[in-house]
Amino acid sequence: MSTDVEQPSEADEAAAIAAPEVIANTLGEYVKIWWTRVRSGESGALPVILGLVVIVVYFQARSSLFLSAGNLVNLIEQAAWIVTLGMAEVFVLLLGEIDLSIGYTSVIGSVFTCWLLVPPDPAPWPLAVLVGLAFPAVFGLIEGVIITRLRLPSFVVTLAGQLAGLGLLLAIINIAAPGSGGTIRLYSSVLNDIENGAMSPLAGWIVMAAAVALGGALMITRDNRRRAGGLAAPPASVTWLKVAAMAVAGVVVVLIGNTNRGVGLVVVSGVPWVILVVLVVLVAWSFLLGRTRFGRYVYAIGGNAEAARRAGINLSRIRVLAFVLAGLTAGVMGIIYASQLGSVSSNVPGGQNVLFAVAAAVIGGTSLFGGRGTMLGAVLGGLIVAVIYNGLQLLGLGASPQYIWTAVVLLAAVTIDTVARRSRTSA
Amino acid sequence: MTTPSADDARPATAGRAAAPESGPSDSPPARGQNGDQPLLRLVGVGKNFGPVRALTDINLDVTLGQVTALVGDNGAGKSTLIKTIAGIWPQDHGEILWEGRPVRLHSPKDAAGLGIATVYQDLALADNLDIVQNMFLGREPVKHWALDETTMEKEAKRTLADLSVVTVRSVRQPVGSLSGGQRQAVAVARAVLRQARLVVLDEPTAALGVTQTRVVLDLIRRLKSQNIAVIVISHNLNDVMAVADRVAVLRLGQLVSVGPLSQYDAQSIVELMTTGTSGRRAAAGSEPSSQQPAGSSSEH
């Protein structure tokens, strides 16, 4: 009556597919399992990071300015909005849906924010931000309800949303700032400082240390809880290596940020606030997707909607909520975008921005068919898009190679991912 | 026959005799009259789709710790019957009794609430989620605002171990990486985890090779040994002969024969499925009282 009837090789193969975090007990085992996974196509963030390194090395070889503190901070400021919009898109892409409207709704939200802050009697900036976040969230809610109630494809509904968004943007800017030629300034210094201000060097170190300590503590308590429950936890050496890697990354970022990037006698230094904003969004949404029921259901629906339905999950509610969260995150992007430019104008390329966001998510390993992808992936993918843009600008090349390069990287990312998976399933 | 005979797994309290159809067999299917109540009893259940009578006057008892094989040709009404039990299509006629009490199964939720779990052929697993995530999908425990992964993983491991599913090396591997038998095992384990008392398996071995089929048949035996009632729909008579305690043969929406496995052989089941009668085991109407085998107590 033994059920032990499968070839051991198959079990080994299967073990190679589970995450090393939950089956390895020693460092050696961990590395071995991790490498098997990489070879079988489950490489996680590795190809994105490798790609990023290759591109960075290339640009540094072409221009020694690329890795200068000034340019890296500049790069971070340029990357912030695309990274955030990429994270917004992940919510809906995980469901196998898409949201084409957030490129404009995000900016409309920030128009409201700017409008509320116009002197002589500006609203308090948190209220203005709240309104700026609420508009795209409500827009997402409406789209989500239309998509789920009328069972329309999200592509079409949000394409309509994009067109309507452009129209609304033109109308609202003209009402908010009549006779300005379609531009509204952002008067709040707090909000302008998101992109253009920086923490004091000391504050940078404190924030970094706190973030690393918190991250490390969470990882270690999780491991301990698993060990206490008799489950496989990663070996302590692996956890400490991860904490160390986090610390090194944090130190590098703060060192870069705290390097004087001023020109001439003006001293400009400090980590830009926008890093903190992006980090908070990344951590919050990663928690939401990875550790809550909502997140679990998003992956389940993206993987097999029928299975999710039979498990008693309310598909419509999760779908609508995903569109709301995509809108909310887009609202954050809108504020960052306004902060970067110091104003919002009606000729924002919202349609193009949203496609860059989808590209960022896909380069970062998110599947357009749903069920696969992470917030961190979208951040790394967005960084790649931004690096290409920044590097080519530094080389004095214009928009044309930027688009072509982005296209090549996008295609390469999808190809590598697909080929790796295919080789796994056929093996 | 290498299979455990029907009475291996019967509750010790199994009431004998009185049941009208027990005949000379030494393993009488439990009939309610004397305290050994069936878990599920269908009385005169019928289902129409417009003018089409998909099911007519079905009488069937399902007992804890027994495997009932539901066999029949395509279109015989097997799927309709299990969908009625699963609450997808409520019956038009007749009554369903659960532990002796009449129940209305209007939705899959009603059925699940009673402890009826149906594992359909497509298994309804999300390939991108791991085994634990699939087993707990829709009812994850939450602690401190976050999913309680430790509890889930421990319980999933225990349930799989109870079912002797040992080929899965990590419960954290995605279901998409599992073999067909293992996937079936995960789907069944999910049902067990949800405290199902009746597990309905729709063609569990249809797409499986020889080795994988053995895994699933062993799994069914484990369910039985945990005193869970099992209904298996199968085309494969070898599988039926291997695990069933009782056989119910459907033909054209009617239950043409019900009885302990020992009263049948492959030949007689095929005859019943195709013609509704068998020389070896007399055909019977769906009336329980008329299921008296006409002198063909083919004990092995």
Image (tube, grey):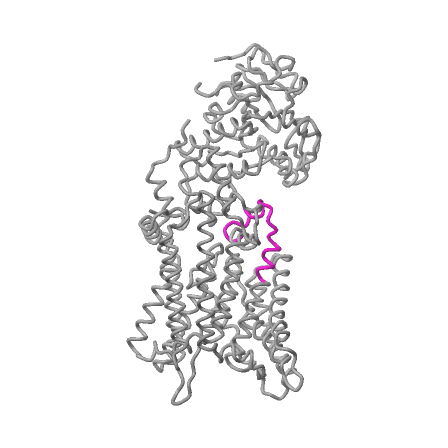
Image location of residue A32, percent across then percent down: 31, 50
Q: Quadrant of the N terminus of chain A?
A: top left
Q: Is residue A128 above or below residue B226?
A: below
Q: Residue at x 64, y 41 (%)?
A: B109
Q: Is residue A85 above or below residue A112?
A: above
Main secondary-structure element of the magenta-colored stretch: helix
Residue A308 falls left or right of residue A68 = right
Q: Depth check: give the residue in front, B123 or A280.
A: A280
Q: Depth check: give the residue in front, A56 or A300.
A: A56
Q: Residue at x 47, y 44 (%)?
A: A229
Q: Is residue B94 above or below residue B175?
A: above
Residue A319 inside the magenta-drawn segment: yes
Image location of residue A114, percent across then percent down: 60, 80
Q: Which residues are magenta?
A: A301-323
- Residue A119's quadrant in the figure? bottom right
Image location of residue A415, percent across then percent down: 37, 60
Q: Residue at x 46, y 33 (%)?
A: B205
Residue found at the very far left of the displayed protein: A61
